[in-house]
Image (cartoon, rainbow, N blue to C red):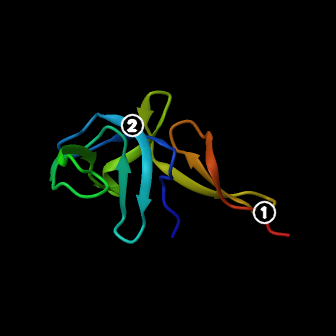
């Protein structure tokens, strides 16, 4: 089943502790239905010194958010996504708010 969000999409968190925050999707984890959004759901982690990071210390990184808690942003507002099959057989993601095409899911059939 295709996902309503993809890497690089501008999304808004629609529920949970970070409701209302926006950011770009850095990574999609389809097995767990989660996404990592830049600048949202930040967690601090204490890291031991290693050869790659000799000083160790505290780092801040983004934690995953469930896909159902984010929606793509169109015109500054979150929108639901519909999937539409065009005449040439290609499948595209369409914003429910204004009908704009968000991206291609499947290329045209030959």
Asked if residue 86 lies left or right of residue 25, the reply is: right
Q: How many marks?
A: 2
Q: Nearer the viewer, residue 78 or 29?
A: 29
Q: Which mark is residue 66?
A: none
Where residue 106 sits, quadrant-wise, is: bottom right
Q: Which x, y percent locates residue 44?
A: 16, 45
Q: Earlier in the sequence, mark 1 or mark 2?
A: 2
Q: Residue furthest top?
A: 76
Asked if residue 50 lies left or right of residue 107, the reply is: left
The residues tagged by marks 1 and 2 sit, at their Cα atoms, a distance apart of 30 Å
Label 1: which secondary element? loop
Q: Which residue is mark 1?
A: 108
Q: Is residue 110 above or below residue 67?
A: below
Q: Is residue 32 above or below residue 101?
A: below
Q: Which x, y percent locates residue 108?
A: 78, 63
Marks 1 and 2: which is nearer the front? 2
Density class for disc 1 (Cα within 10 Å; few <14, some 14-19, many ≥20) is: few
Q: Is residue 4 above or below residue 75?
A: below
Q: Which residue is mark 2?
A: 23
Q: Which x, y percent locates residue 48?
A: 16, 56
Q: Nearer the viewer, residue 72 or 56?
A: 56
């Amino acid at each position: 089943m295709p996902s309503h969000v993809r890497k690089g999409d501008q999304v808004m968190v629609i529920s949970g502790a970070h409701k209302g925050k926006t950011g770009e999707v850095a990574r999609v984890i389809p097995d767990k239905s989660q996404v990592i959004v830049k600048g949202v759901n930040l967690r601090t982690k204490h890291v031991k010194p290693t050869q790659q990071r000799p000083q160790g210390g505290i780092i801040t990184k983004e934690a995953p958010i469930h896909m159902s808690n984010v929606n793509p942003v169109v015109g500054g507002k979150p929108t639901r996504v519909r999937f539409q099959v065009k005449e040439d057989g290609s499948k595209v993601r369409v914003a429910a708010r204004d009908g704009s095409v968000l991206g291609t899911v499947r290329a045209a059939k030959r």
